[in-house]
Image: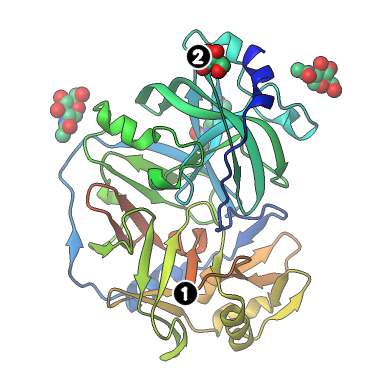
Amino acid sequence: MKWLVLLGLVAFSECIFKVPLRRLKTMRKTLSGNNMLNNVLKEYPYRLPQISFRDSNVTILPLRNMKDIFYVGNITIGTPPPEFQVVFDSTSSDLWVPSIFWNSSTCSTLVRFKHRQSSTFRTTNKTFWITYGAGTMKGVVAHDTVRIGDLVSIDQPFGLSMAEYGFMDRRFDGILGLNYPRQSCSKTKWIFDKLKSQGAISEPVFAFYLSKDEQEGSVVMFGGVDHTYYKGELNSLPLVKADDWSIHVDRISMRREVIACSDGCDALLDTGASFIHGPGRLIDDIQKLIGSEQRDFKHYISCSAVNTLPSIIFTINGINYPVPAQAYILKGSTGHCYTAFRAKRVRTSTESWVLGDVFLRLYFSVFDRGNDRIGLAPAM
Ligand SMILES: *[C@@H]1O[C@H](CO)[C@@H](O)[C@H](O)[C@H]1NC(C)=O
Ligand SMILES: *[C@@H]1O[C@H](CO)[C@@H](O)[C@H](O)[C@H]1NC(C)=O
Ligand SMILES: *[C@@H]1O[C@H](CO)[C@@H](O)[C@H](O)[C@H]1NC(C)=O
Ligand SMILES: *[C@@H]1O[C@H](CO)[C@@H](O)[C@H](O)[C@H]1NC(C)=O
């Protein structure tokens, strides 16, 4: 309790994320399209350059698909280790879980960290706050042993949240950020780099396979790439800057016509976003082209449109990455269908997009920190 009292004395360091960490208001389901993968493969041309990885020790952690809206995996913190369900988020860089000092009706269903029960726990006076698209957390930096599968990071800094706002319908305890350390709000040693420097992972890469429809089958892997999760070759895409998982997109097209990103644009690969987000005006254009109808915050469309609408193609580094209608039209729990395109709430001076789970279910993604690049290949 001592460290909590000190909290009032220190200013919170400010930190805001521009990109959405999904909205969790309603639960949805993608249309199961048997042809989806076939269509993707047909439209997908294989080209150089490609990435290959040495055979190394890969840690594969299962993720649970929460209705195609987000994916969670288990980690443990402390000695003895309680288990936390976290979202592995490629756009933020902090790890945090709820503390027992955060006391509200929201947190009664969550696992909270009981610091007094851990023999390896130590705290600091450092506080910070993070605003995601979906909510805000305020917390204090602590240290303890963190385990992700068989990976162990000793004396790992992490956040303990003292207060949270937003995060509607939350089904995860905390967030484990996998973006570059520069994006860290708590300005602590990034877990991924710490695992690397402690020799826990052989190669500084991690990769995601996100299943469609099924609750099981999704994984995040560390230290290498398991080739059985994708088809063909991994294409190598350079990052815009080596401090964020953003890549350059040549254009976005539909029926051979450019519909957005006409002068090129950037796209952030976001494992913590459910949909595809873009500038409002361009998203409106796409909704019109598709023929969707806006009600409240969603753009609805007839479910049968999946059979007739063409793929929307993201051309990246000269290679086409089609997103077929079966992927960008989703079915809600009420049986209505709606599109997976969303306007970004924050404007940027240059055109930028966020490619979330809708895109990442189609393409197995490798985040290669060692070479500052992304690898993409059609998912199995
Ligand atoms: C994989 O792990 C084993 C045992 O921990 C070790 O002997 C081997 O060198 C590791 N291989 C690589 C490529 O890191
Ligand atoms: C996480 O742990 C809980 C409780 O042990 C278990 O029910 C759940 O299946 C685990 N989730 C994953 C993705 O392994
Ligand atoms: C949390 O709230 C419950 C019920 O409102 C109360 O009984 C409990 O003492 C509170 N715990 C703390 C640590 O404030
Ligand atoms: C917190 O700050 C106080 C005053 O600066 C200092 O005396 C104390 O040792 C610090 N505690 C920790 C755990 O860093």
Is residue 329 among what the camera can see? yes
Amino acid type at circle 2 is Phe
Q: Which residue shows up at 47% across the image and 56% down it?
A: 270
Of 41 and 266, nearer the camera is 266
Quarter holding the C terminus is bottom left
Asked whether the beta carbons under mark 2 and mark 1 sit within 8 Å of each other, the answer is: no
Residue 6 is situated, as x and y percent measured from the top left of the image, at 65, 19
**Does label 1 point to a residue whose CB lies under 8 Å from ligand 2?**
no
- Residue 121 is tagged as 2
Quadrant of the picture in which ligand 1 is shown? top left
Say which residue label 1 marks.
Answer: 350
Residue 102 is situated, as x and y percent measured from the top left of the image, at 71, 27
Q: Is residue 254 above or below residue 306?
A: below
- Quadrant location of residue 275? bottom right
Crowd around label 2: few <14 · some 14–19 · many ≥20 (10 Å): some
Residue 81 is situated, as x and y percent measured from the top left of the image, at 50, 17
Crowd around label 1: few <14 · some 14–19 · many ≥20 (10 Å): few
Of 216 and 58, nearer the camera is 58
Position of 215 with respect to 284 (left or right) is left
Position of 49 with respect to 22 (left or right) is left
- Residue 219 is tagged as none
Residue 146 is situated, as x and y percent measured from the top left of the image, at 44, 24
Please tell me which of labels 2 and 1 falls first in the chain. 2
Q: Which residue shows up at 55% across the image and 33% down it?
A: 96
Quarter holding the N terminus is top right
Q: Secondary structure at mark 1?
A: loop
Distance from Cα at disc 2 to Cα at disc 1: 44 Å
